[in-house]
Amino acid sequence: MIKIIIIGTGNVGAHLCHTIESNSLAGKLLLVGYYNRAQKELSGINTTLIPDLHNLPESDLILLAVPDDSIEKVSQEIKPSRTILAHTSGSVAMNAMQNHENHGVFYMPQSFSKNRAPKFEDITICLESSSEAVHKVLEMVAVTLSRKREQINSSQRKKLHLAAVYMNNFVNHCYTKAGEIMEEASMDTHLLDALMRETLEKAIALSPKKSQTGPAIRNDSKTIEKHIRLLEKEDRDMYRSITKSIQKTHGKKL
């Protein structure tokens, strides 16, 4: 059984706590404690809240689910030992924790929200390890949580994280802007639900590039100008920028 401590209980850390504790019944993983600076207990978790970061209980693996700019600082606060220390960031290099002999990365390219439980079994868990021994432990944890794993180095992971920002964060922001336009016109935003689903399903089935439609790829300048006139200035800039990017990608005349 692999004994695990979670440091940080934001969206990622909290979901890891709940998922690992539920998997403890399988006799493979055991959540022995979790820590956050606010000393706030997690609802629905039976495991003990650790009171002192400098006096952690015995474990095989410590997962750092803290903000990117805190990873190196927190790793330095934890007393070095044989215990594996791994962070969950997509953009921080593994060597940020090189003060610990056994270290690695346990990155999940997924969007985590407080009130929505993720399907860990469908998430590809991306691993990076300082040694083969560390990899074996991280792999055992990943196998217990998910059906999909990949071994990815720090350079690749930075690009993966960048791609994920485009695919998730930027796309979701476009959904938000579309919703604002609908609400301003007193229309139900759910009118676009079928379009959202089809956009995703078609992109997965055909590839995003082959699925591109709309006035930009058609070079429909009249429709583009009509849309721009309907928007506020800052939104016009975003519309023009995305339109130019689509046309450049597909070799259309700008």
Image (cartoon, grey):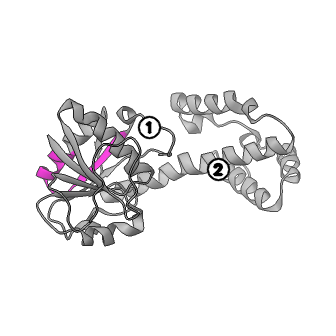
Q: Tell how many labels.
A: 2
Residue appearing at x 27%, y 50% in the figure? 48
* Tag nearer the camera, 1 or 2: 1
Residue 242 marker: none
Residue 173 marker: 2
Up the image or down, 119 lies above or below 35; here it is: above
Task: Find residue 83 and report its image quarter.
Answer: bottom left
| Element marked by disc 2 | helix
Asked whether the beta carbons under mark 1 and mark 2 sit within 8 Å of each other, the answer is no
Q: CA distance from mark 1 to mark 2?
A: 20 Å
Task: Find residue 236 and report its image quarter.
Answer: bottom right
Residue appearing at x 26%, y 71% in the figure? 77
Q: To which residue does mark 1 refer? A: 118
Whether residue 137 is in magenta: the answer is: yes
Which region shows up in magenta? 124-138
Task: Find residue 188 and report its image quarter.
Answer: top right
Where is residue 225? Give x, y as percent: 86, 50
Which residue is nearer to you in this view: 136 or 57? 57
Bin the neighbour count of mark 1 within 10 Å (Cα to Cα): few under 14, some 14-19, many 20 and up.
some
Quadrant of image for the N terminus: top left
Quadrant of image for the C terminus: bottom right
Where is residue 161? Give x, y as percent: 44, 53
Residue appearing at x 64%, y 50% in the figure? 173
Where is residue 115? Give x, y as percent: 51, 41
